[in-house]
Image (spheres, rainbow, N blue to C red):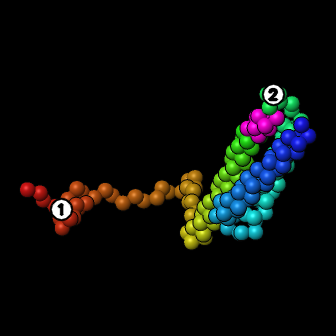
């Protein structure tokens, strides 16, 4: 039985390390677009990978002490490895979701920063002096409004189009 326990732990640790390296290498490229800085992407991916390793190795330790009795030591190891692979797949999916959320937030922040910068530049280009408003003074004569023109005076004959 001790030999089966050691085989299970060895296989479990190897699977966790392989999957962790896959997450790290794939995640680094995935995050580099969001951060733009390869060092920041590497750092964030490394943190997520360390979290992945700690969680899965802890679950591996818990699964390793569960007693499975199928009557055959080889089948016992296969059942435990099956459970461990399911746990590994679940934690892998959760880790990918976490990396995706981090990436989405970073991209949203970059977009918001770009929009704010474009708005700031637009405001600087359109800097129009504030318009002054003239308030009427009580008792002052009303401003003169030009007399309305006749309809013929308003229409420019050169601008009339005829259709057939």
Q: Is residue 147 visible?
A: yes
What crowding class fits label 2: few (fewer than 14 Cα within 10 Å), some (14-19), or many (20 or more)?
few
Whether the magenta-drawn stretch holds residue 152 is answered as no
Quadrant where the N terminus is found in the figure: top right
Q: Overall secondary structure of the magenta stretch?
A: helix
Tell which of 13 and 111 is nearer to you: 13
Quadrant where the C terminus is found in the figure: bottom left
Q: Position of residue 150 (x, y in %)?
A: 24, 57
Q: Name the side, left or right, on which 48 lies relative to 162.
A: right
Q: Position of residue 146 (x, y in %)?
A: 36, 60
Relative to 42, is 7 above or below? above
**Residue occupied by mark 1:** 160
Q: Name the side, left or right, on which 85 lies relative to 64.
A: left
Q: Which residues are magenta?
A: 73-82
Q: Residue reaching furthest left? A: 164
**Which of pointers 2 and 1 lies earlier in the amino acid sequence?**
2
Tell which of 90 and 159 is nearer to you: 90
How far apart are labels 2 and 1 at the CA level?
Answer: 101 Å
């Amino acid at each position: 039985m001790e030999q089966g326990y050691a085989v299970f732990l060895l296989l479990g640790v190897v699977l966790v390390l392989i999957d962790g390296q896959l997450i790290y290498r794939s995640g680094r490229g995935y995050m580099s677009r969001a951060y733009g800085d390869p060092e920041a992407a590497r750092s964030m991916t490394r943190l997520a990978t360390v979290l992945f390793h700690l969680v899965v190795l802890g679950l591996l330790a818990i699964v390793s002490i569960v007693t499975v009795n199928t009557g055959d030591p080889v089948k016992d190891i296969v059942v435990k490895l099956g459970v461990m692979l399911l746990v590994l797949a679940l934690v892998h999916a959760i880790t990918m979701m976490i990396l995706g959320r981090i990436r989405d937030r970073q991209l949203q922040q970059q977009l918001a920063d770009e929009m704010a910068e474009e708005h700031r530049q637009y405001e600087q280009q359109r800097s129009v002096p504030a318009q002054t408003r003239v308030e009427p003074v009580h008792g002052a004569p009303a401003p003169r409004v030009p007399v309305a023109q006749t309809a013929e005076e308003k229409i420019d004959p050169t601008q009339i189009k005829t259709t057939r």
